[in-house]
Amino acid sequence: MSHNPPAPSYPEIVNDLQERKSPRIYKADNAEFTDQRISDLVRTGTAELARIADGTQAVNLTDTDTVKRRTMIYLRACEEVATIPSMSGLARSFGLSTEALNKHRRQKPNSETSVWLEICHDAFADMMAESALRGTVQPVVAIFTLKARSGWRDTLTIEQAPINNPLGDSRSQEELLNEYLNEYTIDERGAGNE
């Protein structure tokens, strides 16, 4: 008997997204979650675990056509609920865990499904970044999410420039002395002029 979670229907995906959508990410205030919000999150997680326990079959990741079709259903649900898509949300819409998607991507990186999932991963990250740039989501939340979930990193590349002669042309002491002396002339009164 399979213990994979069910692949939810479109209305179930919409409902799940509505329940999970945090108004805090889309608003300017940074207040802590209220007790009610925490209770709602736990209730949503409990309902998801209950669906997993019933043993209904999840989307088979080797069936790329079904994966693509279910991705489009998930994206329509995100559009309807006005929430930014994520790989974890996509995984839930497949009836799988995020780790199951990541494991498939690691173990079969060149499979058609993995290539599709990588495209989705990049597109979702772009949507989050664009939302932050437009002021739709809090930039701090977007940066954190992109770093934690999308592999974004702060990087600095230092390249050594070719150094032919960093201090200028080499000149002998005599050349330097002559140049110095030529710059300054002594007039008849003994004062130096330039």
Image (spheres, rainbow, N blue to C red):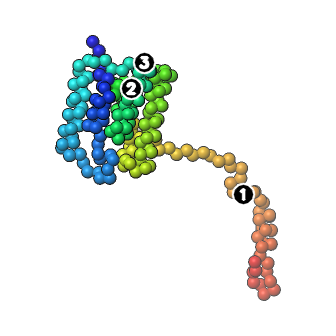
Whether residue 122 is visible to the viewer of this picture, yes or no, is yes
| Residue named by callout 1 | 168
- Which quarter of the figure has residue 97? top left
- The residues tagged by marks 1 and 2 sit, at their Cα atoms, a distance apart of 65 Å
Closer to the N terminus: mark 1 or mark 3? 3
Residue pointed to by mark 3: 63
The image shows residue 159, relative to residue 73, as above or below, that is below
Q: Residue 42 appears in which quarter of the rendering?
A: top left
Identity of the residue drawn at 29% across and 53% down: 29
10 Å neighbourhood of mark 2: few (<14), some, or many (≥20)?
Answer: many
Mark 2 vs mark 3, CA separation in Å: 11 Å
Q: Is residue 137 above or below residue 12?
A: below
Q: Which residue is drawn at 36% across and 24% down?
A: 100
Q: Which residue is drawn at 22% across and 25% down?
A: 50
Q: Residues within 10 Å of mark 3 (few under 14, many from 20)?
A: few
Q: Earlier in the sequence, mark 2 or mark 3?
A: 3
* Mark 1 vs 3: CB contact within 8 A: no
Residue tagged 2 = 70
